[in-house]
Amino acid sequence: MGRTISAKNNFFYLTASLIILLISATLAQALSGSWFDWVLKGVTLFNFAVCLISLQVEKIWFRLLIVIAAGWAIVSVCKLFFPFRQMDTLILLLMLCFFLGTFKIIARKILFTGSIDVNKVVGSVALFLLLGLMWAMVYLIILEFSPQAFTGMTQLPWGENFANVTYFSFVTLTTLGYGDISPLSEIARVAVYLEAIAGIFYMAIVVASLVGASQQHRGEKQDPP
């Protein structure tokens, strides 16, 4: 994998791994069983690995993301022997931190920097998927502390609820709002409208970034040497 991923195609691999994670979550809900819960965790670890390999970041960020991913794996294994509810909260916090760090790194690489190519456009899709996943983690954490925070969802182990919250997160992010799942508690409502605002602003920022970079690249071509 390390030989095939480069700065010209890294966001293709990253976006594909995020899509695989979302599909795996849906399958985990459709095909119930403890074995598929481990498949979901394995896909999550695979996603972490692809992120680490494809981002090609500075050592300090690389080490930080490795520590977070390793911590997530350790806590997931420890949950087998110490099945406390707090373990799920810690797992979700680590996932949120990893996705947040990945989002920040990708944003620095593609927004308002350099010329635009297909890889960067795909990177903007990866950013959108990460944005939805981060808010999904927030909703799962809210459910850990407030089981009745949403209609249409109940407090379950995070793997069993992952498909529901990602569905709700992306419906909110795109401001579709079907209404089959809705927030009840105050903190859940705040998180929901903040995600809706973030989704609208993200679209505006990405369009402005792509247009600005395209115009800058066109201007550089037209300027005499």
Image: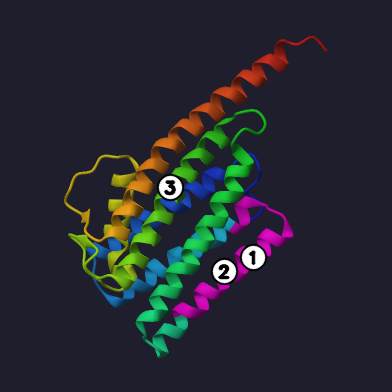
Where is residue 168 drawn, in percent x and y?
28, 52
* Disc 3 element: helix
State whether the magenta stretch is mostly helix, strand or loop.
helix
192 within the magenta span: no
Residue range in magenta is 52-76
Residue at the far front in the pictured view: 186
Closer to the camera in the image, 143 or 87: 143
Q: Are marks 1 and 2 in contact (CB under 8 Å)?
A: yes
Q: Nearer the viewer, residue 41 or 210?
A: 210
Which label was assigned to residue 129? 3
Give the alpha-carbon distance from disc 1 to disc 2, as whole Å. 6 Å
Helix or strand or loop: what does disc 1 sit on? helix
Q: Is residue 88 left or right of residue 11?
A: left
Amino acid at the residue labelled 3: Leu
Q: Amino acid at mark 2?
A: Ile
Mark 3 neighbour class, 10 Å CA radius: few under 14, some 14 to 19, many 20 or more: many
**Residue 66 position within the rendered picture, expressed as x and y whole percent measured from the top left:** 62, 67
Quadrant in which the N terminus is drawn? bottom right
Q: Earlier in the sequence, mark 3 or mark 1?
A: 1
| Number of marks present in the image shown | 3
The structure residue drawn at horizontal position 55% and vertical position 75%, both measured from the top left corner, is 71
Q: CA distance from mark 3 to mark 2?
A: 20 Å
For disc 1, the marked residue is 64
Task: Left or right? Give the position of 72 relative to 157.
Answer: right
Q: Residues within 10 Å of mark 1 (few under 14, many from 20)?
A: some
Please name the residue that numbered disc 2 is placed on. 68
